[in-house]
Image: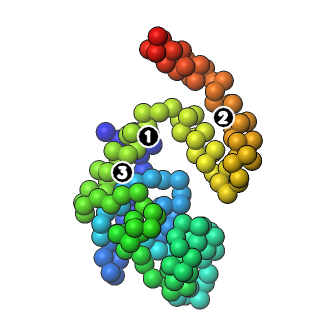
Amino acid sequence: MASRWSAPPYERPGRHGPRLLGFAWVDGGRAGSPRQSAFFGPPRGVARGLGASEGGAIRLPTRLPHHLAMEVLLTGDRLPAARAEQHGLVNRLVPDGQAVIAALDLAERIGRHTRDAVTTVKRIVHTTRGHDESTAFTLQDPISNRLMTSPQAVAGAQRFTRRAT
């Protein structure tokens, strides 16, 4: 069952087998399970005399070991999905032909929660990333307070309290 959060993985055939379209799928706030034969990599800008100007050169070194990120960015080579999983770039791999099913399942599980809760968690993660813990809590408080005082959060807390007693 598709939910309001579903977004299919953007796959396209490539010269070396199927691959996902760049790192935008991983970095764009989407989550999912790529298929085992997928490849990850930046658009081949370096090979065409262009740089990785859409954030790949900024984000990739924070998600992969430095030398591996440099290799991918400087050569334009693709990273097989299994190797991307080994380095934590993807959460899990699924058998070929199951990527859409796995992505829809994940979207359905996320979609069980309110849009406000999901958006708030994402905002906290992105806002606090790279800060020390004390600063992160300071940045988190105004974001989470808006959610905690919403009518949905108050009703949820009341349901939790009734079940706990």
Crowding at mark 3 (Cα within 10 Å: few <14, some 14-19, many 20+)? many
Q: Circle 1 — which element?
A: helix
Which amino acid, mark 3? Ala
Q: Where residue 162 is drawn, which disc sits there?
A: none
Q: Position of residue 165 (x, y in %)?
A: 46, 10
User: In 3D space, how far apart are the residues under numbered discs 1 and 3 (Cα atoms)?
Assistant: 11 Å
Q: Position of residue 151 (x, y in %)?
A: 61, 20
Crowding at mark 1 (Cα within 10 Å: few <14, some 14-19, many 20+)? some
Pointer 1 or 2: first along the chain: 1
Q: Circle 3 — which element?
A: helix
Residue 82 against residue 107 in the figure, above or below: below
Q: Residue drawn at (39%, 39%), measured in percent from left and top?
A: 109
What residue is disc 3 on?
103
Q: Where residue 144 is drawn, which disc sits there?
A: 2
Asked whether 9 or 33 is in front, the reply is: 33
Q: Residue drawn at (29%, 58%), measured in percent from left and top?
A: 94
Circle 3 or circle 2, nearest the eye: 2
User: In 3D space, how far apart are the residues under numbered discs 1 and 2 (Cα atoms)?
Assistant: 18 Å
Residue 76 against residue 110 in the figure, above or below: below
Q: Position of residue 32 (x, y in %)?
A: 40, 54
Residue 7 against residue 152 in the figure, above or below: below
Pointer 3 or 2: first along the chain: 3
Q: How is the image coloured?
A: rainbow
User: In 3D space, how far apart are the residues under numbered discs 3 and 2 (Cα atoms)?
Assistant: 27 Å
What residue is disc 1 on?
110
Asked whether 77 or 86 is in front, the reply is: 86
Report the quarter where the N terminus lies. Answer: top left
Q: Is residue 122 visible?
A: yes
Q: Position of residue 49 (x, y in %)?
A: 59, 89
Which amino acid, mark 1? Ile
Which amino acid, mark 2? Ser
